[in-house]
Structures are given as C-alpha cells and as structure tokens.
Image (cartoon, rainbow, N blue to C red):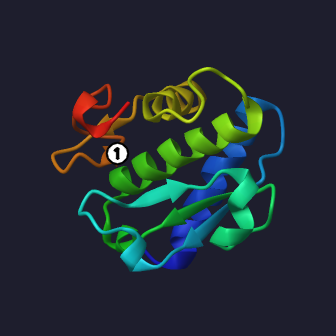
Amino acid sequence: MTPSQLSGEFEKLVRQAEAHCGRSLEVALVLWKPEAFPYPRNYAFCSNPRYGAEFGAWKGCCSICVAPKILQADTARVHGVLMHEIGHAVDFLCTPGHPNHGSERRADDIAQQIWGIPIKYDKDTVQSTCCGVHPRPAHLGL
C-alpha cells in the first residue's frame, strides 16, 4: 500500500465514523518515526487531543500515528488497526469523562458500533478485520 492509498483508506473510515457520530472529527493520520514502534505488534497509537501538536497535527486534534511498516501490512490488518485507533479518537473527542475512557477494549467496542464488525487480534496479536480472536486478549491490556 502506498502512503496515498493509506491516506485514502483512513479518510474513508473517518467519514464513516463522522456519519455514525453525527459530527466532524478532528483527527489526522501521521506516518510517524519507526523508533516509536519498538515491538513487532506496535503499528499505531492515537494521541490525546491535548497533545495533537506534539504528534504532527494541531492542538485539539487526535493524531493517529502509524508505523511505516503499516504500508506492508495486508488490508485486513490496516483496517483493523485504523478502525481501532479511530475508536480511540471517537472516545477522546465524543465521550470525555467516560469511566472507561481510553481503554483498549472500549476502542474496539466503539469501532464495532461504527462499522458493525468486531476487531479481532491475529496470530501476531495485531488488530485485524478478518481473522483472529475477539475480544482483545487480556494479556495485551484492557
């Protein structure tokens, strides 16, 4: 996948999330430094909107920072990772103060509400839309 294709997939998913939420989402995709992803299962993270400017976007914006290796991932992994991270962004932007705010399973639940499919964890314990286990394995943190 090229960076342009990744951006197009991201923008499509954000538009779908915005339609589901009924509001615009301040979220940006940033191809981030590889050293920020030290483990094989690390593909992305979502910044709190307070820190958007520190991660290549602007204050008040959630930055979804992705590892360059996502460009070599299959589509199911790319979608799973992006949907999970957009779930975090929706949580940060639309439900501040929720008791489970920011939790990993909550991001998966939000993604499932938006797209109607569960986020699974594949053989490498990375998010996927096609294969693996659901819900998120407890040993990964909830």
Q: Nearer the viewer, residue 66 or 52?
A: 52
Q: Secondary structure at mark 1?
A: strand
Residue type for callout 1:
Gln
Q: Residues within 10 Å of mark 1 (few under 14, many from 20)?
A: many
Q: Nearer the viewer, residue 14 or 140?
A: 140
84 relative to 129 in the view: left or right: right
Residue drawn at (73%, 31%) of the image = 96
Find residue 24 and report its horizontal and vertical position in percent: 83, 45
Any part of residue 27 in sight = no
The furthest residue to the top: 99
> According to the image, label 1 marks what residue?
127
Q: Nearer the viewer, residue 28 or 20?
A: 28
The furthest residue to the left: 123
Question: Can you say whether 56 is above or below 109 in the image?
Answer: below
Residue drawn at (28%, 39%) of the image = 140
Find residue 114 and report its horizontal and vertical position in percent: 60, 30
Residue drawn at (41%, 46%) of the image = 80
Question: Can you say whether 107 is above or below 6 in the image?
Answer: above
The furthest residue to the right: 23
Quadrant holding the N terminus: bottom left
61 relative to 44 in the view: left or right: right
How many marks overall? 1
Q: Quadrant of residue 70?
A: bottom left
Find residue 12 and report its horizontal and vertical position in percent: 64, 53
Q: Quadrant of residue 73?
A: bottom left
Any part of residue 115 in sight = yes
Question: Can you say whether 31 is above or below 132 in the image?
Answer: below
55 relative to 106 in the view: left or right: right
Residue drawn at (38%, 30%) of the image = 142
78 relative to 73 in the view: left or right: right
Find residue 55 and report its horizontal and vertical position in percent: 63, 69
